[in-house]
Amino acid sequence: MIYAGRMPVTVLLVDDEPLVRAGLRAVLDAQPDIEVVGEAADGAAVIPLVRSLRPDVVAMDVRMPLLDGIEATRAVLRTVDDPPKILVVTTFENDEYVYEALRAGADGFLLKRARPAEIVNAVRLVAEGESLLFPASVRQLAAEHGESGANPAARAAMERAQLTEREAEVLRLMTRGLSNAEIAARMVVGTETVKSHVSAVLAKLGARDRTQAVIAAYESGFVAPG
């Protein structure tokens, strides 16, 4: 199906609970711009499915019996060319496994108890790469599990990045979960200017996306979780 002139966002569901997969499929397939293209019951099956189905987004359970979502995320990003966005699906938002999955390269996370509209919005957002999901929860995770400022490698990487004053301001606003449009309004500049700053921040930090840049900001001590 093509929606409004665009191909739909394709999704691979990975969860060891059939009822969870069935619920997510029902919610997502009901949307004209989203299509579930496959399912897997464990992270061990993710690599071949990603290669054959080429989904835009993988909705990945963080806890699975053979290969958990953390290792599966690392494997996808390490071995797949042009990898999909990865949305971690979890029961508890303060789960240390979630933080480790985000550190491993996941693009955001989704609570299993989320309402259907929240599930749909999360998939769309992570597919677009525009906004960080649940920024307040990520800040809490960073505070509880990230040991802000205690990572020498992260501090050194931030120093090497040599962000300009504008780029540093953009990164601080990104850690608050603001979208490009919201950042533009705060800085009184155009959205395209913000996009350029965001791209520069990601490039200088060697970050795959906004989520990784925000985690780097916390772990380096560039910003404090509080």
Image (cartoon, rainbow, N blue to C red):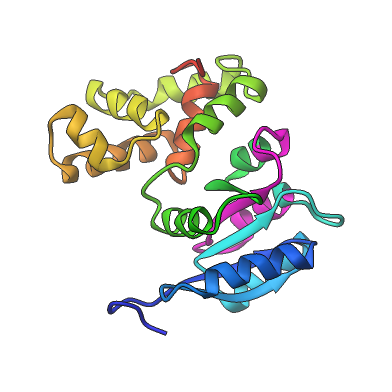
* 187 drawn magenta: no
Horizontal side, residue 195 vs residue 172: left or right: left
Observer-nearest residue: 183 or 118? 118
**Residue situated in front as seen by the camera: 17 or 222:** 17
Q: Residue at x 31, y 24 (%)?
A: 168
Residue at the extreme right: 65
Left or right of 170 in this view: 161: right
**Is 123 rendered above or below residue 49?**
above
Q: In the rendered view of the protein, which quadrant contains the N terminus?
A: bottom left
Residue 56 in view in this figure: yes
Which segment is the magenta one? 71-98
| 7 shown above or below 132 | below
Q: Say which residue appears at 75% left-offset and 60% top-offset.
A: 43
Q: Position of residue 106 (x, y in %)?
A: 58, 47
Q: Percent x, y for residue 10?
A: 50, 72
- Magenta span contains residue 76: yes
Q: How many marks?
A: 0
Q: Position of residue 112 (x, y in %)?
A: 66, 51
214 shown above or below 153: below
